[in-house]
């Protein structure tokens, strides 16, 4: 009997448009190849700082192209998309809620929260950095808003997220979405075709 | 009768691995959709400077991933690839020869030179920044080496290349390869699937 295939590691940031797009195909792609997905909410800003990088949208020319490409890449996948304003936003509260749910209620609950947050921000422009908006999103997602707010203010979940960011940096991750398939790193929504071939045929 | 479809504009730098990879599929892709390709040799360094960007390989973490991704992306397309050393290199001489050939012998001759240069550097590690190596490449490509060297030292072809760089900057180009299809900009070898759909189905 073959050993169980390893899960795909999927690193994302709640403020990353390409993470949103990839979050909508990664589960189906994995399932087609008998794989599961391990989701990791992280802060892209922490990895940018470690790698001495800046967001592409901090460069005016690159921002203009990127804004166009975000929307086109979403349409390419048939996804609803709105360019949120403000963008980008700090996402530590949404990410801490992710890890709180993950560690206390399980990975599936955390993944559902990830989908809820990414869709809220990128399909409806809900500002996840706003406490009231995040509380409403929690309530709409069946998460107690008081408990969610307590979690994002709790030193325990702050430390948990910091550890995840440190792990990402230690693993050489400097962008999102970031995938690791059987030890092989893939950066970007646009690596979908390579990941697909890797899953179908093995290393190439 | 339909008007003639517009050519695809393809901007590249002789020192760009993703330009090399894209240069090997762009003609066939265009032809499948009844299009031709207009090649533009440019200096990525000039556009980086204008956009206040740096090469991805100037960031240590990004360099390590990029080097891996260059080779993997070449294998994905079934292309020979070697990580050249030194990398990146100044490519103004190769680019001036491109424009000299383009303007005096025609676009097809310039495209043949582009293929020769990109393949020499990325499949065999030939340092295009070295005058002797570039002269040998010219000779091997049926281009008179003395005339090539005279062209790359000539103020006329220096000015021609500078104008191309200025045009690229004015058009908002900040990376390579860069494609324009019916006015729509696409940046990167990894936009192949989007370009393909655009050509097949029109704007999406």
Image (cartoon, coloured by chain):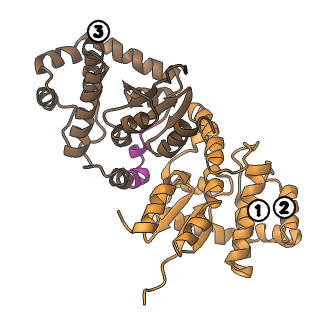
Chain colours: A brown, B orange
* Residue that mark 2 sits on: B137
* Residue that mark 1 sits on: B116
Residue B179 point in image, percent of width and height: 51, 63
Residue A3 point in image, percent of width and height: 53, 19
Residue B145 point in image, percent of width and height: 87, 68
Asked whether residue B172 is in view, the answer is no
Tell me: residue B20, above or below residue B171. above
How many discs appear? 3
* Residue that mark 3 sits on: A156
| 2 and 1 marks in contact (CB < 8 Å) | yes
Please tell me the numbered disc located at residue B165. none
Q: Secondary structure at mark 3?
A: helix
Mark 2 Cα shell of 10 Å, populated few (<14), some (14-19), many (≥20): many
- Mark-to-mark CA distance, 3 and 1: 59 Å
Query: Quadrant where the C terminus of chain A lies?
Result: top right
| 2 and 3 marks in contact (CB < 8 Å) | no
Asked whether residue B101 is in view, the answer is yes
Residue occupying the far front of the picture: A1
Residue B10 point in image, percent of width and height: 57, 65
Q: Which stretch is magenta?
A: A54-66
The residue lying toward the viewer, choosing from B59 and B34, is B34
Chain of the residue that carries numbered disc 2 in the rendered image:
B
Residue occupying the far bottom of the picture: B1
Q: Please, what is the dominant secondary structure of the magenta stretch?
A: helix
Q: Residue at x 55, y 56 (%)?
A: B47
- Residue A64: within the magenta? yes
Closer mark to the observer between disc 2 and disc 1: 1
Chain of the residue that carries numbered disc 3 in the rendered image:
A
- Residue B39: within the magenta? no
Chain of the residue that carries numbered disc 1 in the rendered image:
B
């Amino acid at each position: 009997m073959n050993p169980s295939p390893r899960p795909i590691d999927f690193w994302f940031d709640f403020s990353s448009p390409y993470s949103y797009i990839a979050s909508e195909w990664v589960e189906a792609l994995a399932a087609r190849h008998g794989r599961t997905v391990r989701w990791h909410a992280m802060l892209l800003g922490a990895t940018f700082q470690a790698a001495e990088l800046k967001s592409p949208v901090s460069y005016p020319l690159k921002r203009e192209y990127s804004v166009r490409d975000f929307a086109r890449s979403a349409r390419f996948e048939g996804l609803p998309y709105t360019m949120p304003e403000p963008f980008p936003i700090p996402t530590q509260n949404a990410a801490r809620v992710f890890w709180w749910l993950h560690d206390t209620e399980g990975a599936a609950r955390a993944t559902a929260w990830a989908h809820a947050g990414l869709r809220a921000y990128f399909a409806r422009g809900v500002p996840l950095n706003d406490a009231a908006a995040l509380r409403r999103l929690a309530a709409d997602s069946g998460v107690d808003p008081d408990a969610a707010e307590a979690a994002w203010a709790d030193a325990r979940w702050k430390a948990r997220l910091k550890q995840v960011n440190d792990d990402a940096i230690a693993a050489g991750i400097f962008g999102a979405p970031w995938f690791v398939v059987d030890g092989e790193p893939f950066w970007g929504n646009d690596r979908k075709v390579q990941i697909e071939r890797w899953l179908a045929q093995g290393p190439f």
